[in-house]
Image: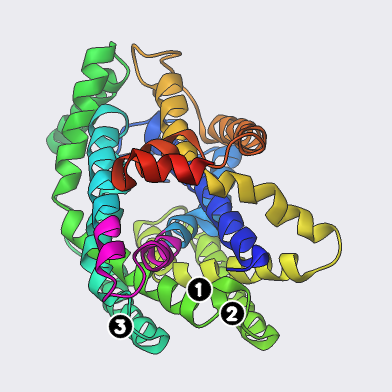
């Protein structure tokens, strides 16, 4: 693998893990039922709040978890090799098994929104497909994603035409339940831990669908890698086309956001936007990939962007878990500042920006002294054995 290819993949991982934090921030700060809502956000719908929501939903939401999923599909091939390589297949299986363990611990002990377990399960599902050709991977992934996208759009939109079942009593009951959940997350350390674990259990019911979605994105990602798109080896024409499609998807989303505001935050407009946002996420993601490739290919100041992000990506696992530790310490009750339910979207954006700066500086400092991140070292020691991990560290 060439140096430029390594820098590209690392830079994309860095971009992914930093971008995911802005999308996840509301889930740390308020109860799950309200975190992504524009209508029921507990701090109102002031212009600053709506502006941060709009920018996050337009440019960040779904795009960076999609990028992370695509790159994880690539890692299955880089670690596991072709399907017939039994030794590397064993390493990959152990790698995914330990990731599932980390995911369970992360999801139950830190934050209910864990993606590690989903990636581990999707990786085990995807192992048999890692030797497929680029064309077969792309076709299969796109077909699965297209079917899911119809559901992403149709389900929420159709639900807006159903008779509203809520009554004053049900509304009051829901508000009381929300208040109880918020009190638990913002209470002492034990109550916030239990509230988080309960939410994690509820989310496990959706795991089969999440695994299918993630597997489709992994197929698309590995297909793009084998086709040269994620290695920086595709033609300039290919990247221009991906940029054009990604820009078109963002223009469409901008129009839908304008509809949301023009309709005074109507449920139909919001539901339509959310469905289209999920469906078009891979297009915007590949446009971001294209911009990163063009930055690496440039001879000017733009090369600084991938160089800035690459160390963050080299220790993406450590940075992802560190984000949860920091955010839980800031927001959950009994573990630090206990700011749960007290910070609006602009404040969340400021906190995220501060963490971005800290993680970029920390990653550069750490990777200048060590060959891998701390959790990456622990993980490799577990799935490769002490001798292999020590040899890699040297």
Nearer to us in this view, 104 or 164 = 104
Question: What distance separates the C-alpha of mark 3 from that of mark 1?
Answer: 16 Å
Question: What distance separates the C-alpha of mark 2 from that of mark 3?
Answer: 19 Å
Between disc 2 and disc 3, whose residue precedes?
Answer: 3
Circle 1 crowding by C-alpha within 10 Å: few under 14, some 14–19, many from 20: many
For label 1, the SS is helix
Instruction: Report the side of 303 relative to 178 (left or right).
Output: right
Residue contact at pointers 2 and 1, CB within 8 angstroms: yes
| Residue 315, position as x, y percentages in the image | 52, 43
Residue beneath the point at 16% across and 47% down: 204
Between circles 3 and 1, the one closer to the viewer is 3
Most common SS among magenta residues = helix
Residue under label 2: 242
Nearer to us in this view, 63 or 305 = 305
Residue contact at pointers 3 and 1, CB within 8 angstroms: no
For label 3, the SS is helix
Residue under label 1: 283
Circle 2 crowding by C-alpha within 10 Å: few under 14, some 14–19, many from 20: many
> Does residue 392 belong to the magenta stretch?
no
Residue under label 3: 140
Q: Which residues are magenta?
A: 69-92
| 46 up-or-down from 257: above or below | above
């Amino acid at each position: 693998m060439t140096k430029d290819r390594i820098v590209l993949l690392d830079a994309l991982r860095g971009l992914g893990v930093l971008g995911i934090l802005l999308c996840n921030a509301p889930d740390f700060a308020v109860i799950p039922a309200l975190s992504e809502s524009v209508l029921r956000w507990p701090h109102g719908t002031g212009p600053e709040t709506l502006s941060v929501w709009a920018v996050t939903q337009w440019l960040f939401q779904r795009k960076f978890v999609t990028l992370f999923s695509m790159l994880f599909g690539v890692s299955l091939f880089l670690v596991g090799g072709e399907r017939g390589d039994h030794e590397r297949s064993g390493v990959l299986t152990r790698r995914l098994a330990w990731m599932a363990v980390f995911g369970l611990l992360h999801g139950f002990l830190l934050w209910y929104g864990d993606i590690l377990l989903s990636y581990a399960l999707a990786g085990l599902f995807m192992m048999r497909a890692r030797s497929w050709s680029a064309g077969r991977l792309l076709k299969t992934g796109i077909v699965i994603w297209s079917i899911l996208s119809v559901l992403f759009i149709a389900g929420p939109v159709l639900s807006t035409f159903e008779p509203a079942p809520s009554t004053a009593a049900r509304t009051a009951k829901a508000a009381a339940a929300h208040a109880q959940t918020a009190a638990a997350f913002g209470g002492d350390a034990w109550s916030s831990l239990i509230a988080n674990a309960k939410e994690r259990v509820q989310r496990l019911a959706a795991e089969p669908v999440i695994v299918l979605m993630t597997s489709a994105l992994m197929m698309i990602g590995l297909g793009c890698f084998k086709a040269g798109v994620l290695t920086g080896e595709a033609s300039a024409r290919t990247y221009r086309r991906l940029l054009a499609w990604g820009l078109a998807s963002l223009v469409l989303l901008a129009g839908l956001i304008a509809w949301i505001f023009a309709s005074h935050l109507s449920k139909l407009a919001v539901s339509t936007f959310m469905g289209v946002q999920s469906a078009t996420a891979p297009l915007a993601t590949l446009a971001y990939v294209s911009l990163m490739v063009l930055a690496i290919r440039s001879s000017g100041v733009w090369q600084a962007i991938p160089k800035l992000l690459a160390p963050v990506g080299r220790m993406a696992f450590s940075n992802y878990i560190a984000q949860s530790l920091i955010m839980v310490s800031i927001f959950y009750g009994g573990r630090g500042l206990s700011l749960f339910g007290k910070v609006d979207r602009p404040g969340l954006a400021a906190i995220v920006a501060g963490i971005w700066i800290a993680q970029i500086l920390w990653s550069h400092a750490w990777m200048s002294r060590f060959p891998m991140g701390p959790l990456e070292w622990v993980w490799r020691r577990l799935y490769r054995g002490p001798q292999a991990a020590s040899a890699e560290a040297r």
